[in-house]
Amino acid sequence: MVEKHRRTMVKAASYRVFATMTVFAVSYLYTGSFASAASIGLTAAVAKTMLYYTWERLWSNISWGLEAVE
């Protein structure tokens, strides 16, 4: 079973939206600044999306824990 690149991208993007909202909220609570929270959230979103995509693609090459569905 091989995951296609498009599926990996959709998973990464949808998770990133959810996680970015969390990072933004926590950053805003700590800084009290909308601009700072947005900057932190955006920077984290870009970096973590690239890392997540790479991580998923690496794991898609590992067959451990996968079963064929008949």
Image (spheres, rainbow, N blue to C red):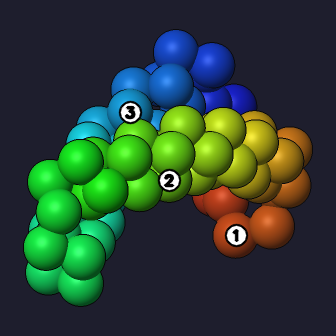
| Residue shown at the point (50%, 53%) measured from the top left | 44
CA gap, disc 3 to disc 2? 13 Å
Q: Residue 22 occupies which quadrant of the picture?
A: bottom left
The residue to which callout 2 is attached is: 44
Res. 40 visible in picture: yes
Q: CB of mark 3 within 8 Å of CB of mark 1?
A: no
Q: How far apart are marks 3 and 1 (CA)?
A: 25 Å
Using the image as rendered, state which of residue 51 and residue 1 is in the foreground.
Answer: 51
Image vertical order of residue 31 relative to residue 54, above or below: below
| 2 and 1 marks in contact (CB < 8 Å) | no
Q: Is residue 27 left or right of residue 49?
A: left
Q: Mark 3 points at which residue?
A: 13
The residue under the point 14% across, 54% down is: 34
Q: Which amino acid type corresponds to the residue marked 3 in the rendered image? A: Ala
Q: Which three-letter amino acid code belongs to the residue tagged 2?
A: Ala
Q: Nearer the viewer, mark 3 or mark 2?
A: 2
If the image is split into quadrants, where does the N terminus sit? top right
Q: Crowding near pointer 3: few (<14 within 10 Å), some, many (20+)?
A: some
Q: Which of 58 and 36 is in front in this view?
A: 36
Residue for badge 1: 65
Report the residue that reaches farthest toward the top: 6
Q: Tell me whether the residue at label 3 lies in contact with that at label 2, contact meaning CB atoms closer than 8 angstroms.
A: no
Which residue lies at the image location 80% right of the left edge and 67% below the top edge?
A: 64
Q: Which of marks 2 and 1 is in front?
A: 2
* Secondary structure of the residue carrying numbered label 3: helix
